[in-house]
Image: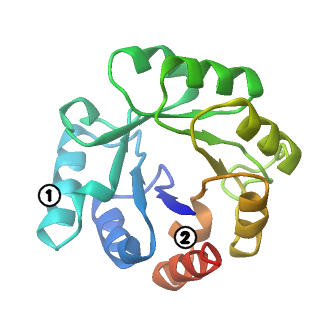
Amino acid sequence: MKLHALSPGNISHRLWVEKALKISRHVDFLHLREPEWKNEDTERALYLFTEAGGDPRQIILNTKTAGWKNWNGKIHYPEHELPRLGQRKGSVSVHSLESAGKADEAGAEYIIFGPVYEPRSKTGVQGVGLKKLTEVVKMVSVPVIAVGGITPERVRETADAGAAGAAVISGIFYANDPRGAAASYRERSRW
């Protein structure tokens, strides 16, 4: 099962580098999703991460992040940018069965679907549940990554529902010990 760590959207480039380096050996992918950053912040973060020994192949740049067009690596689209998949391949976040079908038809490399559970990063947002996750998995031909309220204890049940991976925001980036949290998720994603 693939483990994706998504940046929280409100972190400095230096803090992102610090945390990304701590967790990188425990996750498969590091999503950089920072809409407030400027091009310079993104370039600096990517440079510092790589210079410190981080593997740039782990990084997936969200199109909400400045500088993504200059990135030669993997990219990720928010749901409202689904039509852009025709211009440049990548993954996409979706929140409904209909959008999942459209993303699959448009050629998404994989789909991040949710929130499956109530996310800690978005108060008042309800999760759609494991049944909807299973419906999406059965409907599309691409891998589905579960997101939203994923705890280490819930990783297995998302896999049992058919998810090919789990995407985590708060559980890793807001943890007192991001490395330990990422290691816990990694441990639960193997069986």
The x and y percentages for residue 54 are: 23, 68
C-alpha span from label 2 to label 1: 22 Å
Q: Amino acid at mark 2?
A: Ile
Above/below status of 168 relative to 35: below
In the figure, is residue 159 to the left or right of 127? left
Based on the displayed image, in which of its 4 quarters is residue 39 positioned?
Answer: top left
- Is disc 1 placed on a helix, strand or loop? helix
- Asked if residue 33 lies left or right of residue 74, the reply is right
Local crowd at mark 2 within 10 Å, few (<14), some, or many (≥20)? Answer: many
In x, y percent, where is residue 163? 68, 52
Report the colour scheme. rainbow
Residue type beneath disc 1: Tyr
Quarter of the image with the N terminus in it: bottom right
Proximity of marks 2 and 1: CB atoms separated by less than 8 Å: no
The residue under the point 17% across, 48% down is: 43
The spot of residue 119 in percent (x, y) is: 73, 54
Q: Quadrant of residue 150?
A: bottom right
**What's the mark number on residue 168?**
none
Foreground residue among 79 and 58: 58
Reading the chain from its start, which is encountered first: label 2 or label 1? 1
Residue at position x 39%, y 15% from top?
86
68 sits to left or right of 53? right
Q: Which residue is mark 1?
A: 47
Residue 130: x %, y % from top left:
84, 50
Q: How many marks?
A: 2
According to the picture, the residue beneath numbered tag 2 turns out to be 172
The relative height of residue 34 versus residue 166 in the rendered view (above or below) is above
